[in-house]
Amino acid sequence: MAIGIMIFAEALLTLAVVWGILHEDKLIRFERNFAAAVKARVRYVRRRAAAAQHRRINARVLYTPTTVVGRMDDSRAA
């Protein structure tokens, strides 16, 4: 059984190589489209991960502390 599967896989691979040689222009176009799709998907996943991280950071902040910076009033200094 295993030998039959190996022979089938080798025959399929051989046919794919022959088809690639005969239709090189279609194969190149497919490779470019595939690479562009993978690149777009990676960019999408990274953006979603960054957005999720920002949401987690913003969810942890309960308040925004503020401080007043400046000089003291002269009436209180004496």
Image: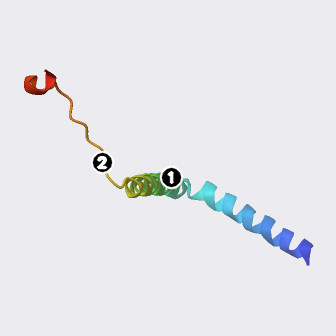
**Residue 14 image-quadrant placement:** bottom right
What's under tag 1, amino acid-wise?
Ala
Q: Residue at x 49, y 53 (%)?
A: 42
Q: Residue at x 91, y 72 (%)?
A: 3
What's under tag 2, amino acid-wise?
Thr
Point out residue 9 in the picture as x, y percentages from the top left corner: 78, 68
**Residue 72 image-quadrant placement:** top left
In the figure, 76 relative to 45: above or below? Answer: above
Neighbourhood count class around disc 2 (C-alpha, 10 Å): few under 14, some 14–19, many 20 upward: few
Q: Nearer the viewer, residue 68 or 62?
A: 68
Q: Residue at x 26, y 41 (%)?
A: 66
The N terminus is located in which quarter? Answer: bottom right
- Residue occupying the far left of the picture: 75
Point out residue 27 in the picture as x, y percentages from the top left corner: 54, 56
The C terminus is located in which quarter? Answer: top left
Mark 1 — residue? 35
Point out residue 74 in the picture as x, y percentages from the top left corner: 9, 22
Q: Is residue 75 left or right of residue 27?
A: left
Query: Looking at the rendered structure, which numbered label has been put on residue 64?
Result: 2
Spatial distance from mark 1 to mark 2, Cα to Cα? 44 Å
The residue mark sitting in front, 1 or 2, is 2
- Judged from the image, the secondary structure of the residue bearing numbered disc 1 is helix
Query: Looking at the rendered structure, which numbered label has been put on residue 70?
Result: none
